[in-house]
Image (tube, grey):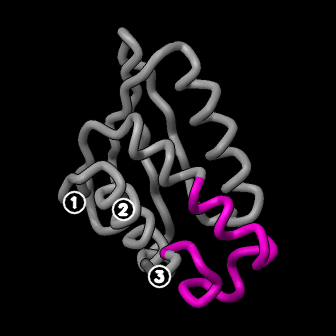
Amino acid sequence: MTNPLSSECAPDACTLPDAERPLRVAEFDALFRRALRAIGRVDETSVRMTLAGDEALLPAVDDLTARETECCSFFRFTITQLGNGVLELDVAVPPAHVGMLDGLARLAADAAGLRV
């Protein structure tokens, strides 16, 4: 699979070094494989994901999304705790970065065996 979070999608927008990008994609992939339960498009520039897991899920999602925002500041991640280990992760981007959102949504859906 082509790296959906690669610099080819947003060459001037991502500051994560090329060597670290496969590792970051692998982190997202692992998170989505174990925790993603549902994903849907809210509108053209945002996606909502439902994640479920144990008490380690919130700190893991918070850490990963904070690190992703450091290198790709156009991403806006909002985490909402729904209770019983369930989180909603809203991901939004400006219109110029919809391609990156599409890539993240594809990565998530593919990892969890879901459709966007």
Locate residue 115: give its quadrant: bottom left
The residue labelled by disc 1 is 116
Bounds of the magenta segment: 4-26
Q: Which of marks 3 and 2 is in front?
A: 3
Q: Relative to 23, is 32 above or below?
A: above
Residue 25: x and y in percent read 58, 62
Q: Position of residue 116 (x, y in %)?
A: 22, 60
Whole-percent x, y for residue 43 in the image: 26, 61
Q: Nearer the viewer, mark 3 or mark 1?
A: 3
Q: Which amino acid type is marked by label 3? A: Thr
Please tell me in which quadrant of the rendered image residue 62 appears: top right
Write the residue at 39% across / 45% down.
33
**Residue 2 tag number:** 3
Earlier along the polypeptide chain: callout 3 or callout 1?
Answer: 3
- The circle drawn on residue 105 is 2
Q: How far apart are marks 1 and 2 (CA)?
A: 7 Å
* Amino acid at circle 2: Ala
Residue at the (54%, 47%) spot, across then down? 77
